[in-house]
Image: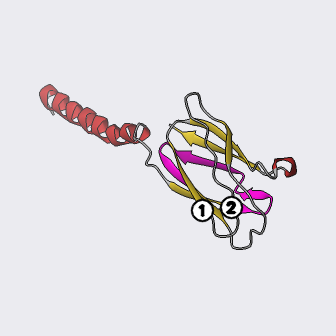
């Protein structure tokens, strides 16, 4: 094998290795797709109480058919710049949706049952 042939072979292998690494690097910076997640509103608790979603995800709070009491969903803290929001009062069959468009931690309570520990946290990833 001549030195020119060795150089070309080494160059080809280097190029193949570089190309093989590209998909792995591209995957780490790929944007996460928004999701649709459901939180059940039960008598005196949300299910789940902690949730992590991608930025731009839509959360649906769904009052279960067995929810007899009146409940709501009130945002009590959020990333800077997020406007406060609150669902209406609901019971069995009520549904409330909200799209979360800013990364960070969102904390919610039921204003009727906060003292019973009815609260939840949603973390929105970048």
Q: Are marks 2 and 1 in contact (CB under 8 Å)?
A: yes
Classify residue 117 as left or right of residue 92: right
Q: Position of residue 96 (x, y in %)?
A: 59, 57
Sequence-first tag of 2 and 1: 2
Decide: few, some or many residues near mark 1? Use Cα within 10 Å; few <14, some 14-19, many ≥20.
some
Q: Position of residue 66 (x, y in %)?
A: 74, 73
The residue at 86%/47% (across/down) is 115
Q: Is residue 75 depicted above or below 91 in this figure?
A: above
Instruction: State which quadrant residue 72 falls in.
Output: bottom right
User: Tag 1's secondary structure?
Assistant: strand
Q: CA distance from mark 2 to mark 1?
A: 8 Å
Indicate yes or no whether the magenta region holds residue 87.
no
Q: Nearer the viewer, residue 89 or 58?
A: 89
Relative to 9, is 123 on the left or the right? Answer: right
Disc number lying in front (2 or 1): 2
- The answer to which of 39 and 25 lies nearer the viewer is 39
Residue 95 is marked as 1
The residue segment tinted magenta is: 41-59
**Overall secondary structure of the magenta stretch?**
strand
The tally of labels here is 2
Residue at image position (44%, 45%) is 32
User: Which of 25 and 13 lies nearest the eye of the viewer?
Assistant: 25
Q: Which mark is residue 12?
A: none
Rendering coords of residue 81 (x, y %): 55, 29
Snapshot quadrant of residue 88: bottom right
Vertical placement of residue 45 versus 33, above or below: below
Residue at 63% x, 35% y is 78
């Amino acid at each position: 094998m001549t030195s020119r042939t060795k150089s070309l072979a080494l160059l080809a292998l280097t190029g193949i290795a570089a190309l093989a690494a590209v998909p792995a690097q591209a995957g780490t910076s790929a944007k996460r797709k928004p999701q649709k997640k459901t939180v059940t509103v039960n008598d005196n608790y949300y299910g789940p109480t902690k949730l992590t979603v991608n930025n731009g995800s839509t959360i649906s709070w769904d009052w279960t058919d067995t929810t007899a009491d009146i409940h709501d969903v009130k945002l009590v803290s959020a990333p800077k710049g997020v406007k406060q929001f609150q669902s209406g009062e609901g019971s069995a069959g009520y549904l409330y949706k909200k799209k979360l468009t800013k990364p960070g931690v969102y904390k919610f309570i039921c204003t009727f049952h906060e003292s019973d520990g009815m609260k939840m946290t949603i973390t929105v990833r970048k």
